[in-house]
Amino acid sequence: MTGFVYKELKQNLRYILLTVVSGFIPLIVLIMFRDSGETASDFQKLLEIGLIGGLLLAGGMEMAVLNGDDRKLWAYFVSSTSEGYKGFLRVKYEMIFVMSLLFLTSFTLCEQLITAIAADRGMMVESSASAIAVPLVFIQFLLRSVDIPLFYRFGAKRAIP
């Protein structure tokens, strides 16, 4: 089991780090459109646009974790281990779960930073994007729970259009 976890961390470290960075997309959007953020509702809209963009990027990184394991030699190795394919799939699910939690944590931190920036500019901005982010992350969990079996059953070319 620890071998699968080590392999996932070693092979997909850049995707994990990009998932953390995707939580800061709202801050990047805010910096890019800093001149248009004159009212609190503008800040809120930019925050929500950044949330959706970051969530899409994080979903792409989660699916990119699956790409390295479609070789026949790796399938022979996985089936010969004591955990077998069930342990392998469990580690994949856990990895995607941790990546989603990392995104949610970094987004929450980014949201608090944006709220502090708005307060510094004299605006009162509600930090309600987390109330939107949590259900969206759970929807993403649901989508990944459908994508992973299809990916491993039909392969990357047929399962993901």
Image: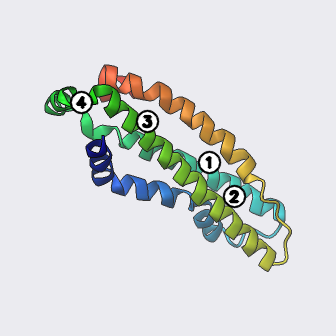
Name above or below for residue 122 compared with residue 138.
below
Q: CA distance from mark 2 to mark 3?
A: 29 Å
Residue extending farthest left: 73
Q: CA distance from mark 4 to mark 3?
A: 18 Å
Relative side of 122 to 101, left or right = right
Q: CA distance from mark 2 to mark 1?
A: 9 Å
Instruction: Please tell me which residue is depicted at 68% across the width and 62% down the height of the picture.
Output: 111
Q: Which residue is mark 3?
A: 93
Give, as a three-letter code, the residue at label 2: Leu
Q: Nearer the viewer, residue 124 or 83?
A: 83
Q: CA distance from mark 3 to mark 1?
A: 22 Å
Q: Position of residue 88 (x, y in %)?
A: 32, 33
Which circle, 4 or 1, is nearer the viewer? 4
Q: Which residue is mark 2?
A: 47
Q: Which mark is residue 134?
A: none
Q: Which mark is residue 82?
A: 4
Relative side of 106 to 118, left or right = left
Instruction: Please tell me which residue is depicted at 33% across the width and 52% down the height of the picture.
Output: 9
Give, as a three-letter code, the residue at label 3: Tyr
Give, as a three-letter code, the residue at label 1: Ile
Quarter of the figure that contains the N terminus: top left
